[in-house]
Amino acid sequence: MIKVERPGEGDEMRRNYLQLEAGRGDQSSYFTRVNAGKESVGVDMSRPEGQAIIRDLARVADVVVENFMPGVIARLQCDYGTLRAVKPDIIYCSISGFGQTGPWRSRPAFAHIINAASGLMHLEQGDEPAPRASNLQAADVLAATHAATAILSALIRRGRTGKGAYLDVSMLEALIAADSVTYAAVLNGGEEYGNPRPGMIVAPIGDRYLAMQFTGSPELWPRLLSVMNPELGRDPRFDTSEKRRANWRELRPIVESWLAAFGTIEDAIKTLAEARIPCAPVLRPAEVIAESHLATRQFFPAVPHPARGTVRVTASPYHVDGEPLRPRGPAAYRVGEHTRAVLGDLLGYPAERIAELLRTRVI
Protein backbone atom coordinates (compact mmCIF):
# COMPACT_ATOMS: atom_id res chain seq x y z
CA MET A 1 0.00 0.00 0.00
CA ILE A 2 1.39 3.39 -1.01
CA LYS A 3 0.65 6.49 1.06
CA VAL A 4 1.09 9.80 -0.74
CA GLU A 5 2.30 12.57 1.58
CA ARG A 6 3.17 16.22 1.12
CA PRO A 7 6.95 16.63 0.69
CA GLY A 8 8.58 18.06 3.77
CA GLU A 9 5.90 18.19 6.45
CA GLY A 10 4.03 15.05 5.40
CA ASP A 11 0.78 13.82 6.90
CA GLU A 12 -0.45 16.11 9.67
CA MET A 13 -1.05 13.05 11.86
CA ARG A 14 2.73 12.72 12.16
CA ARG A 15 2.60 15.66 14.59
CA ASN A 16 -0.05 14.19 16.88
CA TYR A 17 0.29 12.81 20.41
CA LEU A 18 2.45 10.89 21.58
CA GLN A 19 5.81 11.76 19.98
CA LEU A 20 8.08 8.73 20.01
CA GLU A 21 11.43 10.46 19.53
CA ALA A 22 12.96 13.44 21.31
CA GLY A 23 13.87 16.29 19.02
CA ARG A 24 11.41 15.31 16.30
CA GLY A 25 7.81 16.34 15.83
CA ASP A 26 6.84 13.89 13.10
CA GLN A 27 6.85 10.60 14.99
CA SER A 28 3.50 10.35 16.74
CA SER A 29 2.36 6.99 18.04
CA TYR A 30 -0.98 7.60 16.29
CA PHE A 31 0.71 7.93 12.89
CA THR A 32 2.78 4.82 13.50
CA ARG A 33 -0.29 2.80 14.51
CA VAL A 34 -2.47 3.65 11.51
CA ASN A 35 0.30 3.62 8.90
CA ALA A 36 2.21 0.46 9.79
CA GLY A 37 3.03 -1.45 6.62
CA LYS A 38 2.52 1.45 4.23
CA GLU A 39 5.17 2.90 1.94
CA SER A 40 5.51 6.70 1.89
CA VAL A 41 5.86 8.59 -1.37
CA GLY A 42 6.27 12.35 -1.08
CA VAL A 43 4.65 14.20 -4.00
CA ASP A 44 3.66 17.86 -4.41
CA MET A 45 0.24 17.34 -5.93
CA SER A 46 -0.27 21.07 -6.49
CA ARG A 47 2.25 21.02 -9.36
CA PRO A 48 1.66 19.53 -12.82
CA GLU A 49 4.75 17.35 -12.51
CA GLY A 50 3.41 15.91 -9.25
CA GLN A 51 0.00 15.30 -10.79
CA ALA A 52 1.69 13.39 -13.59
CA ILE A 53 3.27 11.10 -10.99
CA ILE A 54 -0.15 10.41 -9.45
CA ARG A 55 -1.50 9.48 -12.88
CA ASP A 56 1.44 7.13 -13.40
CA LEU A 57 0.77 5.52 -10.01
CA ALA A 58 -2.89 5.10 -10.97
CA ARG A 59 -1.85 3.18 -14.11
CA VAL A 60 -0.35 0.42 -11.95
CA ALA A 61 -2.82 0.62 -9.03
CA ASP A 62 -5.94 -1.37 -8.33
CA VAL A 63 -7.46 1.12 -5.89
CA VAL A 64 -7.18 4.84 -5.14
CA VAL A 65 -8.50 6.27 -1.84
CA GLU A 66 -8.66 10.01 -1.11
CA ASN A 67 -10.21 12.01 1.73
CA PHE A 68 -9.90 15.62 0.62
CA MET A 69 -12.87 17.94 0.96
CA PRO A 70 -15.09 17.56 -2.12
CA GLY A 71 -13.76 19.64 -5.00
CA VAL A 72 -10.13 19.73 -3.87
CA ILE A 73 -9.03 16.58 -5.67
CA ALA A 74 -10.56 17.86 -8.92
CA ARG A 75 -8.53 21.06 -8.63
CA LEU A 76 -5.44 18.88 -8.20
CA GLN A 77 -6.29 17.08 -11.47
CA CYS A 78 -6.37 13.73 -9.66
CA ASP A 79 -10.11 13.13 -9.56
CA TYR A 80 -11.90 9.99 -10.70
CA GLY A 81 -12.53 11.22 -14.22
CA THR A 82 -8.87 12.09 -14.71
CA LEU A 83 -7.52 8.82 -13.33
CA ARG A 84 -10.14 6.71 -15.09
CA ALA A 85 -8.86 8.16 -18.37
CA VAL A 86 -5.48 6.52 -17.74
CA LYS A 87 -6.81 3.39 -15.95
CA PRO A 88 -10.39 2.65 -17.08
CA ASP A 89 -10.97 -0.10 -14.50
CA ILE A 90 -9.63 1.82 -11.51
CA ILE A 91 -11.51 1.49 -8.19
CA TYR A 92 -11.64 5.05 -6.84
CA CYS A 93 -12.96 5.73 -3.33
CA SER A 94 -13.66 9.21 -1.93
CA ILE A 95 -14.21 9.44 1.84
CA SER A 96 -15.54 12.76 3.13
CA GLY A 97 -17.45 14.15 6.07
CA PHE A 98 -20.80 14.65 4.37
CA GLY A 99 -20.46 12.97 0.98
CA GLN A 100 -19.72 14.29 -2.48
CA THR A 101 -23.22 15.71 -3.07
CA GLY A 102 -25.76 17.75 -1.12
CA PRO A 103 -25.79 21.19 0.55
CA TRP A 104 -23.31 20.12 3.27
CA ARG A 105 -20.74 18.61 0.90
CA SER A 106 -18.18 21.43 1.32
CA ARG A 107 -18.24 21.56 5.11
CA PRO A 108 -14.95 20.61 6.80
CA ALA A 109 -15.31 17.66 9.13
CA PHE A 110 -13.62 15.61 11.79
CA ALA A 111 -15.16 12.80 13.83
CA HIS A 112 -16.16 15.26 16.58
CA ILE A 113 -18.09 17.42 14.12
CA ILE A 114 -19.82 14.41 12.58
CA ASN A 115 -20.79 13.14 16.02
CA ALA A 116 -22.61 16.43 16.61
CA ALA A 117 -24.25 16.58 13.17
CA SER A 118 -25.36 12.94 13.31
CA GLY A 119 -27.66 13.34 16.31
CA LEU A 120 -25.62 10.84 18.33
CA MET A 121 -23.99 13.50 20.50
CA HIS A 122 -27.49 14.60 21.52
CA LEU A 123 -28.60 11.03 22.18
CA GLU A 124 -25.54 10.32 24.32
CA GLN A 125 -26.10 13.45 26.42
CA GLY A 126 -28.95 11.86 28.33
CA ASP A 127 -29.33 13.44 31.77
CA GLU A 128 -26.05 15.35 31.50
CA PRO A 129 -26.40 19.15 31.54
CA ALA A 130 -24.79 19.57 28.12
CA PRO A 131 -23.51 17.50 25.16
CA ARG A 132 -19.85 16.52 25.32
CA ALA A 133 -17.02 15.32 23.12
CA SER A 134 -16.36 11.60 22.77
CA ASN A 135 -13.06 9.75 22.74
CA LEU A 136 -14.51 7.25 20.29
CA GLN A 137 -13.55 8.23 16.74
CA ALA A 138 -16.52 6.27 15.44
CA ALA A 139 -17.16 8.33 12.31
CA ASP A 140 -13.57 7.86 11.11
CA VAL A 141 -13.44 4.13 11.81
CA LEU A 142 -16.91 3.30 10.52
CA ALA A 143 -16.43 5.29 7.30
CA ALA A 144 -13.13 3.48 6.71
CA THR A 145 -14.73 0.10 7.41
CA HIS A 146 -17.59 0.79 5.02
CA ALA A 147 -15.05 2.01 2.44
CA ALA A 148 -13.06 -1.20 2.75
CA THR A 149 -16.20 -3.29 2.26
CA ALA A 150 -17.26 -1.23 -0.75
CA ILE A 151 -13.77 -1.49 -2.26
CA LEU A 152 -13.71 -5.26 -1.88
CA SER A 153 -17.15 -5.51 -3.44
CA ALA A 154 -16.02 -3.33 -6.35
CA LEU A 155 -12.94 -5.50 -6.86
CA ILE A 156 -15.13 -8.62 -7.01
CA ARG A 157 -17.41 -6.89 -9.52
CA ARG A 158 -14.40 -5.84 -11.59
CA GLY A 159 -13.18 -9.42 -11.60
CA ARG A 160 -16.51 -10.50 -13.05
CA THR A 161 -17.24 -7.61 -15.42
CA GLY A 162 -13.98 -5.72 -15.97
CA LYS A 163 -15.72 -2.53 -14.81
CA GLY A 164 -14.14 -0.07 -12.39
CA ALA A 165 -16.07 1.95 -9.81
CA TYR A 166 -16.38 5.32 -8.14
CA LEU A 167 -17.25 5.01 -4.44
CA ASP A 168 -18.59 7.93 -2.39
CA VAL A 169 -18.42 7.23 1.37
CA SER A 170 -19.92 9.67 3.88
CA MET A 171 -18.73 9.76 7.51
CA LEU A 172 -22.09 11.25 8.50
CA GLU A 173 -24.11 8.47 6.92
CA ALA A 174 -21.79 5.79 8.35
CA LEU A 175 -22.39 7.14 11.86
CA ILE A 176 -26.14 7.58 11.50
CA ALA A 177 -26.41 4.02 10.20
CA ALA A 178 -24.58 2.79 13.32
CA ASP A 179 -27.40 3.95 15.62
CA SER A 180 -29.12 0.88 16.98
CA VAL A 181 -32.70 1.98 17.63
CA THR A 182 -33.48 5.69 17.37
CA TYR A 183 -33.40 6.36 13.64
CA ALA A 184 -35.43 3.26 12.80
CA ALA A 185 -38.02 4.44 15.34
CA VAL A 186 -38.08 8.19 14.59
CA LEU A 187 -38.26 7.56 10.83
CA ASN A 188 -41.53 5.76 11.52
CA GLY A 189 -43.16 8.03 14.09
CA GLY A 190 -41.45 6.72 17.21
CA GLU A 191 -39.49 8.47 19.96
CA GLU A 192 -35.77 8.97 20.49
CA TYR A 193 -33.99 6.17 22.31
CA GLY A 194 -31.01 7.92 23.87
CA ASN A 195 -29.39 7.94 27.28
CA PRO A 196 -30.11 6.74 29.82
CA ARG A 197 -30.49 3.52 27.83
CA PRO A 198 -33.11 1.22 29.38
CA GLY A 199 -31.61 -2.04 30.56
CA MET A 200 -28.02 -0.77 30.42
CA ILE A 201 -26.30 -0.12 33.74
CA VAL A 202 -23.02 1.49 34.75
CA ALA A 203 -22.96 1.25 38.53
CA PRO A 204 -20.35 1.88 41.23
CA ILE A 205 -19.16 -1.04 43.33
CA GLY A 206 -16.58 0.08 45.84
CA ASP A 207 -14.12 2.35 44.05
CA ARG A 208 -14.75 0.78 40.64
CA TYR A 209 -17.58 0.65 38.10
CA LEU A 210 -19.41 -2.26 36.55
CA ALA A 211 -21.27 -2.28 33.24
CA MET A 212 -24.08 -4.79 32.81
CA GLN A 213 -27.02 -5.23 30.49
CA PHE A 214 -30.32 -7.06 30.71
CA THR A 215 -31.91 -5.89 27.47
CA GLY A 216 -31.32 -7.10 23.93
CA SER A 217 -32.53 -10.64 24.60
CA PRO A 218 -35.81 -11.69 26.26
CA GLU A 219 -33.99 -14.23 28.46
CA LEU A 220 -31.88 -11.65 30.28
CA TRP A 221 -34.57 -10.05 32.46
CA PRO A 222 -35.76 -13.40 33.90
CA ARG A 223 -32.14 -14.35 34.56
CA LEU A 224 -31.55 -11.13 36.46
CA LEU A 225 -34.73 -11.63 38.48
CA SER A 226 -33.59 -15.12 39.45
CA VAL A 227 -30.48 -13.76 41.21
CA MET A 228 -31.79 -10.37 42.31
CA ASN A 229 -35.47 -10.55 43.33
CA PRO A 230 -38.08 -12.76 41.61
CA GLU A 231 -40.88 -10.68 43.18
CA LEU A 232 -39.76 -7.66 41.18
CA GLY A 233 -41.02 -9.36 38.04
CA ARG A 234 -44.58 -9.09 39.34
CA ASP A 235 -44.32 -5.34 39.94
CA PRO A 236 -46.90 -3.77 37.56
CA ARG A 237 -44.39 -1.06 36.67
CA PHE A 238 -41.94 -3.59 35.26
CA ASP A 239 -43.92 -6.65 34.12
CA THR A 240 -43.44 -5.98 30.40
CA SER A 241 -40.46 -4.81 28.40
CA GLU A 242 -42.38 -1.71 27.30
CA LYS A 243 -43.17 -0.80 30.92
CA ARG A 244 -39.54 -1.35 31.94
CA ARG A 245 -38.49 1.02 29.18
CA ALA A 246 -41.09 3.64 30.12
CA ASN A 247 -40.29 3.37 33.85
CA TRP A 248 -36.55 3.01 33.47
CA ARG A 249 -35.72 5.90 35.81
CA GLU A 250 -37.54 4.03 38.58
CA LEU A 251 -36.07 0.61 37.78
CA ARG A 252 -32.46 1.68 37.39
CA PRO A 253 -31.86 2.71 41.05
CA ILE A 254 -33.34 -0.61 42.21
CA VAL A 255 -30.82 -2.58 40.15
CA GLU A 256 -27.97 -0.25 41.09
CA SER A 257 -28.82 -0.60 44.79
CA TRP A 258 -28.68 -4.39 44.47
CA LEU A 259 -25.29 -4.20 42.75
CA ALA A 260 -23.93 -1.83 45.40
CA ALA A 261 -24.48 -4.52 48.04
CA PHE A 262 -21.69 -6.68 46.57
CA GLY A 263 -18.43 -6.49 48.45
CA THR A 264 -16.26 -6.31 45.33
CA ILE A 265 -16.73 -5.96 41.61
CA GLU A 266 -15.36 -9.49 41.22
CA ASP A 267 -18.17 -10.83 43.42
CA ALA A 268 -20.77 -9.10 41.26
CA ILE A 269 -19.20 -10.38 38.04
CA LYS A 270 -19.15 -13.94 39.41
CA THR A 271 -22.87 -13.83 40.27
CA LEU A 272 -23.87 -12.23 36.98
CA ALA A 273 -21.66 -14.51 34.90
CA GLU A 274 -23.14 -17.60 36.56
CA ALA A 275 -26.59 -16.29 35.61
CA ARG A 276 -25.32 -15.64 32.06
CA ILE A 277 -25.92 -11.90 32.23
CA PRO A 278 -23.49 -9.80 30.14
CA CYS A 279 -21.23 -7.68 32.33
CA ALA A 280 -17.72 -6.24 32.48
CA PRO A 281 -15.68 -3.95 34.69
CA VAL A 282 -15.09 -0.44 33.36
CA LEU A 283 -11.37 -0.63 32.53
CA ARG A 284 -8.77 2.03 31.94
CA PRO A 285 -6.68 1.70 28.75
CA ALA A 286 -3.61 0.53 30.71
CA GLU A 287 -5.73 -2.22 32.27
CA VAL A 288 -7.01 -3.27 28.84
CA ILE A 289 -3.43 -3.53 27.53
CA ALA A 290 -2.46 -5.67 30.54
CA GLU A 291 -5.31 -8.15 30.06
CA SER A 292 -4.17 -11.70 29.26
CA HIS A 293 -7.08 -12.12 26.85
CA LEU A 294 -5.68 -9.58 24.39
CA ALA A 295 -2.18 -10.96 24.86
CA THR A 296 -3.52 -14.38 23.84
CA ARG A 297 -5.10 -12.78 20.79
CA GLN A 298 -1.78 -11.02 20.01
CA PHE A 299 -3.66 -7.77 19.53
CA PHE A 300 -0.81 -5.43 20.51
CA PRO A 301 2.10 -6.43 18.25
CA ALA A 302 5.35 -4.49 17.93
CA VAL A 303 6.72 -2.96 14.73
CA PRO A 304 10.29 -1.74 14.19
CA HIS A 305 11.16 1.91 14.76
CA PRO A 306 14.63 3.41 14.07
CA ALA A 307 14.77 5.43 17.29
CA ARG A 308 12.70 3.35 19.71
CA GLY A 309 13.70 -0.11 18.53
CA THR A 310 10.09 -1.23 18.52
CA VAL A 311 6.70 0.47 18.91
CA ARG A 312 3.58 -1.38 19.99
CA VAL A 313 0.47 -0.87 17.87
CA THR A 314 -3.00 -2.35 17.56
CA ALA A 315 -3.50 -5.23 15.13
CA SER A 316 -6.43 -5.84 12.82
CA PRO A 317 -9.47 -6.99 14.83
CA TYR A 318 -9.82 -10.33 13.07
CA HIS A 319 -7.87 -13.54 12.55
CA VAL A 320 -7.41 -15.29 9.20
CA ASP A 321 -7.27 -19.08 9.19
CA GLY A 322 -6.76 -19.06 12.92
CA GLU A 323 -3.88 -16.59 12.90
CA PRO A 324 -3.86 -12.87 13.85
CA LEU A 325 -3.26 -10.42 11.01
CA ARG A 326 -0.15 -8.48 11.99
CA PRO A 327 1.23 -5.35 10.28
CA ARG A 328 3.57 -6.34 7.46
CA GLY A 329 6.15 -3.74 8.45
CA PRO A 330 6.75 -0.42 10.19
CA ALA A 331 5.30 2.96 9.35
CA ALA A 332 7.44 5.18 7.17
CA TYR A 333 10.02 6.90 9.38
CA ARG A 334 10.69 9.74 6.94
CA VAL A 335 8.25 11.51 4.64
CA GLY A 336 8.75 10.03 1.20
CA GLU A 337 11.33 7.47 2.28
CA HIS A 338 10.07 5.05 -0.39
CA THR A 339 9.77 7.62 -3.18
CA ARG A 340 12.92 6.62 -5.06
CA ALA A 341 12.10 2.90 -4.91
CA VAL A 342 8.47 3.33 -5.98
CA LEU A 343 9.26 5.70 -8.86
CA GLY A 344 12.24 3.67 -10.00
CA ASP A 345 11.20 0.07 -9.41
CA LEU A 346 7.43 0.31 -9.78
CA LEU A 347 7.06 3.07 -12.37
CA GLY A 348 10.38 2.61 -14.19
CA TYR A 349 11.50 6.25 -13.95
CA PRO A 350 15.18 6.63 -14.91
CA ALA A 351 17.58 7.89 -12.25
CA GLU A 352 18.04 11.18 -14.10
CA ARG A 353 14.31 11.97 -13.98
CA ILE A 354 14.09 11.12 -10.28
CA ALA A 355 17.08 13.35 -9.57
CA GLU A 356 15.44 16.24 -11.45
CA LEU A 357 12.17 15.78 -9.56
CA LEU A 358 14.11 15.87 -6.32
CA ARG A 359 16.06 18.95 -7.39
CA THR A 360 12.88 20.86 -8.23
CA ARG A 361 11.17 19.56 -5.04
CA VAL A 362 8.27 17.96 -6.84
CA ILE A 363 9.13 14.88 -4.72
Image (cartoon, rainbow, N blue to C red):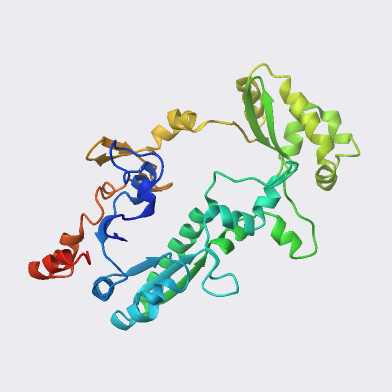
Residue 30 vs 345, above or below: the answer is: above
Outermost residue toward the top in this view = 263
Q: Is residue 86 visible?
A: yes
Give the quadrant of residue 276. top right
Name the residue located 49 percent from the left edge and 55 percent from the top edge: 140
Q: Where, by quadrant of the figure, is residue 107 drawn?
A: bottom right
Q: Is the C terminus in the top left, top right, bottom left or bottom right quadrant?
A: bottom left
> Toward the viewer: 273 or 257?
257
Q: Point out residue 362 in the picture as x, y percentages from the top left corner.
A: 22, 67
Q: Nearer the viewer, residue 290 or 155?
A: 290
Would residue 210 be found to the left or right of residue 303 on screen? right
115 lies left or right of 161: right
Question: As drawn, is 246 to the left or to the right of 272?
Answer: right
Using the rendered image of the protein, determine whether residue 321 is visible from the camera's viewpoint.
Answer: no
Residue 39 image offset from top left, x and y in percent:
26, 56
Looking at the rendered structure, the number of numbered marks drawn on it comes to: 0
Quadrant of the rendering where the N terminus is positioned: bottom left
Please give the name of the residue rendered at 22% of the width and 40% of the height, measured from the top-left corner.
306
| Residue 161 sits in quarter | bottom left
Q: Residue 301 at x, y = what percent?
A: 33, 38
Residue at the location (84% across, 46% down)? 246
